[in-house]
Amino acid sequence: MPDWMRWQIDWIAWLQGIQPPWAIVFWRAMSFLGEEQAFLLILPALLWCYRKRETLYAATGLLLGSYLTFVLKDLLAQPRPFQVAPDRVHVLLPGGEALGYGFPSGHALNAAALWGTLAWTIGQPLLTRLAIGLVLLIGLSRIVLGVHFIHDVLGGWGIGALIAFLTARLAPQVVSHLVSLRQRLLSATGAVILLFLAHSTRETAVPLGAWLGMVWGAVGESQGGGFHPGGPLWQQGLRLAFGLITVGAVYVGLTAAFSLLPFSGEPALRLLRYAGVGLWVTWGAPLAFIRLGLARHQRAIEGLPADPRPRNL
């Protein structure tokens, strides 16, 4: 074991040794905030009840980061600390022993990409402080739970921050230059096809499919007049409850339907399944909100600023 890896093992073992039982529950909760299931709750809530445009940018950063995470893990094939030193590092996360390659930490990268993009584009000091705190805690949880080296998390933070910066700077400019409906749809579809062909696995199919469905849905929602994420608290609460129930139903329904098809395990079918979920989140559910009187009209991607100024990050 090289020295740069040995001192990290020593530090992780020491860190685990000073944790009281209640702290493990806390770190597991922090780790959950970087899971796919958490994002299925967080992103729709932000989109439907907070800021549409900025959430779409943040989701783009998250899904791009998730794709890049799987590509780098497969290319670099780095071990995790409990695999290198099973006698010293304990896996404190249920199911953690089944995890794949280590570098970079997907939790750290995705948290930095999502919350960094959101904080950068909105520019509110309170949100920025909250974003920094969440990113730090999510990344640190992966070290304490014994599933990542320190350099895994540092690398994830660095790559995620770079993705957040680029997304916040470039995404509005790209959208403003793609004026026509056809340009937007073809550009998104072409980008997903190229990225999928470059690295087509079951893991990369998830973020690529979700992003494709999200973009198609956002374009359709905007063309149809769109919805406003504001409103009284009771209306937002009903919107969120109804929306999350329907997302769960769509997710389960598509999973069951696709399992009946030949070659159901193929990455391409998985991509289409998650595209359906993304399409429902950004178009189907908002359309239902309008029909049910739970939201009023407002377009999502019209009139975007060409060069937003990053603030307070």
Image (tube, rainbow, N blue to C red):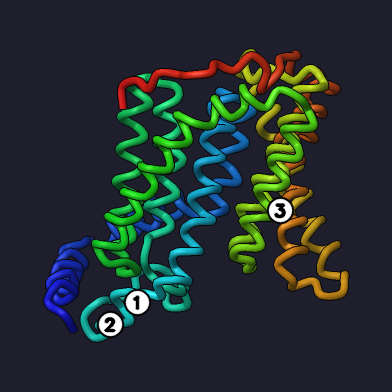
| Mark 2 lies on residue | 84
Q: Is 63 situated left or right of 108 in this image?
A: right
How far across and down, in percent of the image, does residue 8 sit? 17, 69
* Residue drawn at 74 percent across, 14 percent down: 296
| Mark 1 lies on residue | 79
Instruction: Kindly identify the amino acid type of the residue bearing the numbered disc 1.
Output: Pro
Relative to the observer, which residue lies in front, 258 or 171?
A: 171
Image quadrant for the N terminus?
bottom left
How many marks do you count on the picture?
A: 3
Q: Are the two marked residues, 1 and 2, in contact with CB atoms closer than 8 angstroms?
A: yes
Q: Where 11 falls versus 69 (above or below)?
A: below
How far across and down, in percent of the image, does residue 226 sit? 75, 20
Instruction: Kindly identify the amino acid type of the residue bearing the numbered disc 2.
Output: Val
Q: Earlier in the sequence, mark 1 or mark 2?
A: 1
**Quadrant in the rendering for residue 36:** bottom right
Distance, label 3 to label 1, CA atoms, is: 29 Å
Instruction: Kindly identify the amino acid type of the residue bearing the numbered disc 3.
Output: Tyr
How far across and down, in percent of the image, does residue 50 sit? 56, 23
How far across and down, in percent of the image, does residue 242 sit? 73, 34
* Residue drawn at 54 percent across, 31 percent down: 171
* Residue drawn at 71 percent across, 58 percent down: 271
| Mark 3 lies on residue | 274
Image quadrant for the C terminus?
top left
Relative to the observer, which residue lies in front, 170 or 24?
A: 170
